[in-house]
Amino acid sequence: MIRRQGDRLLVSGALTLASVKAVLLEGSTAIGQGVRSVDLGEVDELDSSALALLIAWLREAKRLKRALVFTNLPPGLTTIARLYGVADLLCVSQATGSPAAGSSSPASSSHH
């Protein structure tokens, strides 16, 4: 399920092969309408198709020459991204109040 709050999308529920197609279309439309961040903090079930979804949204944002960041990525999703070697493709912004592995190292990530 997707809810929009201004230039932010809040994604909740399952991001699995069964649901990702509808979420992809809805999110892509929202990106075209100016969404700049996607909060995944309420996602409670996912599989590797969730990673494909995020990469597709990044591709759509790039096509439209827009920036897109992800916040509150579930740990399982970051693990999948690392396993597939695409973690660096995800533009991740640390949201306040969200514990992150390695958050004690201040220079853990720098993108240009």
Image: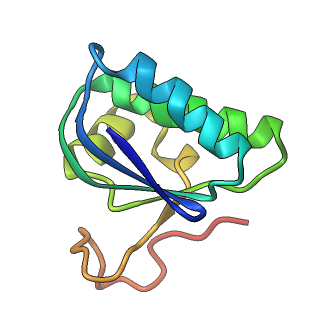
37 or 4: nearer the viewer: 4
Instruction: Name the residue located 77 percent from the left edge and 41 percent from the top edge.
Output: 62
Instruction: Name the residue located 29 percent from the left edge and 42 percent from the top edge.
Output: 77
Give x and y (percent) for residue 87.
45, 45
Q: In which image quadrant can residue 81 be found?
A: top left
Specify whether 37 is left or right of 103: right
Quarter of the picture holding the N terminus: top left
41 or 9: nearer the viewer: 9
Instruction: Name the residue located 31 percent from the left edge and 20 percent from the top edge.
Output: 19
Specify whether 34 is left or right of 50: right
What color scheme is it? rainbow
Give x and y (percent) for residue 82.
36, 41
Specify whether 25 is left or right of 10: right
Task: Answer above or below: position of 97 versus 24.
Answer: below
Specify whether 28 is left or right of 21: right
Toward the left, the furthest residue is 44
Give x and y (percent) for residue 89.
57, 44
Tally of numbered discs = 0
Task: Answer above or below: position of 94 versus 34.
Answer: below
Quarter of the picture holding the C terminus: bottom right
Give x and y (percent) for residue 88.
53, 49
Instruction: Name the residue located 26 percent from the left edge and 70 percent from the top edge.
Output: 100
Q: In which image quadrant can residue 55 be found?
A: top right
Task: Answer above or below: position of 38 versus 24.
Answer: below
